[in-house]
Image: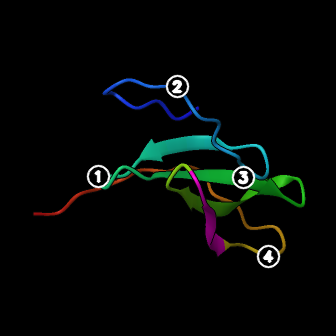
Amino acid sequence: MRVNAAGGAPTEVQIEGQPSKAEWLPDGRITFITVANGIGAVLNVTDGRTQTVLLSFQGGASFTDLAVRNYP
């Protein structure tokens, strides 16, 4: 769900797949991993309205963790 801090009704965020290891990005988007071929192999980002695939591993590769790092 997406909730406006200023008030108003929450809206449902449509996600394709089963998200895991989600992290907020500094610009308000959320990055998360979804499963493909039985493993956590797709890195996605959403702004609460649109889901975009950033990286998708083929075969047996998968993500082991997810961290957001900001550099000055």
Q: Most prominent secondary structure in the magenta stretch?
A: strand
Q: Which of marks 2 and 4 is nearer the N terminus?
A: 2
Which structural element holds mark 4? loop
Coordinates of residue 22 in the picture (x, y in percent): 54, 43
How far is mark 3 from mark 4, CA to CA? 13 Å
Q: Residue 34 carries which label?
A: 3
Furthest residue toward left: 72
Q: Residue 26 carries which label?
A: 1
In the picture, measured across the screen, residue 30 lies left or right of residue 6, that is right
Q: What stretch is highlighted in magenta?
A: 49-55
Coordinates of residue 8 in the picture (x, y in percent): 44, 25
Q: Which residue is drawn at 57% across and 41% down?
A: 21
Q: Which of marks 3 and 4 is nearer the N terminus?
A: 3
Q: Earlier in the sequence, mark 3 or mark 2?
A: 2
Q: Earlier in the sequence, mark 4 or mark 1?
A: 1
Q: Residue at x 77, y 53 (%)?
A: 16
Tell me which amino acid carries mark 4: Gln
Coordinates of residue 29 in the picture (x, y in percent): 43, 53
The residue labelled by disc 4 is 58
In the picture, measured across the screen, residue 28 lies left or right of residue 66, that is left
How far is mark 2 from mark 1, CA to CA? 24 Å
Tell me which amino acid carries mark 3: Thr
Instruction: State yes or no: discs 2 and 1 in contact (Cβ < 8 Å).
Output: no
Which structural element holds mark 2? loop
